[in-house]
Amino acid sequence: MKIAVFVSGGGTNLQNIIDAVEEGTLPNVEISMVMADRDCYAIERSLDKDIRTYVLDRKTFSEDAEHNLEGEEIDLIVLAGFLTILTPEFTSKWGSKMINIHPALLPKFGGKGMYGAKVHQAVLEAGEKTSGATVHYVTAGVDEGQIICQGTFEIEAGDEVADLQRKVAEVESKIYIQAIKQISEA
Ligand code: GRF
């Protein structure tokens, strides 16, 4: 299975995928390319492994990405900390072959503007007892696509945004690899 990974940030999820491929946890998976919508650390992780890497303009990302994907026979697009909202044309073409990971338990705490620390802040303010991460297919509605899997953890008294970030990252490192593996074996 050939995958393209879209990134905007630190690239911890990208690194998890790279490691899983190298360690043989994802034996059927090849990372064909990485596309970033801004200058970010994820690009360094990608270049470090000699993966074909593109940095695209946010305003024309969907069109430019589509161009780069032409003729590449990509089986799955993996959004890994990717922040640009893709065009409806792009999501309708790729939606059944495109997944995202969200740092909370959807359908709650999702949607436009819900990313990074804001998500964890909202979870804490709502007084939730648990949080987690969700892997889902991507549709035009932000964070509204079909859920593939979730991982959860308990929120403990005194937990702050940084604690939730750390616990979510741990859950994400497991469930994103599981979801990609499951799709690669289907
Ligand atoms: C995670 O919170 C993930 O859920 C969200 O982006 C964050 C990770 O970014 N979509 P990265 O993989 O470190 O770039």
Image (tube, rainbow, N blue to C red):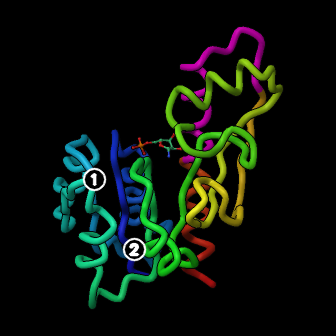
Residue 22 pos. (x, y %): 36, 63
Q: Quadrant of the N terminus?
A: bottom left
Relative depth, front residue between 100 and 37 = 37
Residue at screen point 57% across, 39% down: 170
The residue located at (52%, 77%) in the rendering is: 92
Q: Amino acid at mark 1?
A: Arg
Q: Is residue 63 above or below residue 112?
A: below
Tag 1 residue: 58
Q: Which residues are magenta?
A: 155-172
Q: Which quadrant holds the C terminus? A: bottom right
Say whether residue 173 is magenta.
no
Estimate the x, y position of residue 17 in percent, counting from the top left: 42, 58
| Disc 1 residue crowd, few under 14, some 14–19, many 20+, Cα 10 Å | some
Give the residue displayed 61% in from the left and 66% down from the top: 137
Q: Is residue 161 magenta?
A: yes
Magenta: main secondary structure: helix
**Numbered tag placed on residue 3 in the rendering:** 2
**Amino acid at dot 2:** Ile
Q: Secondary structure at mark 2?
A: strand
Q: Position of residue 46 (x, y in %)?
A: 24, 56
Q: Earlier in the sequence, mark 1 or mark 2?
A: 2
Q: What's the distance in space between the residues labelled 1 and 2, CA to CA?
A: 21 Å
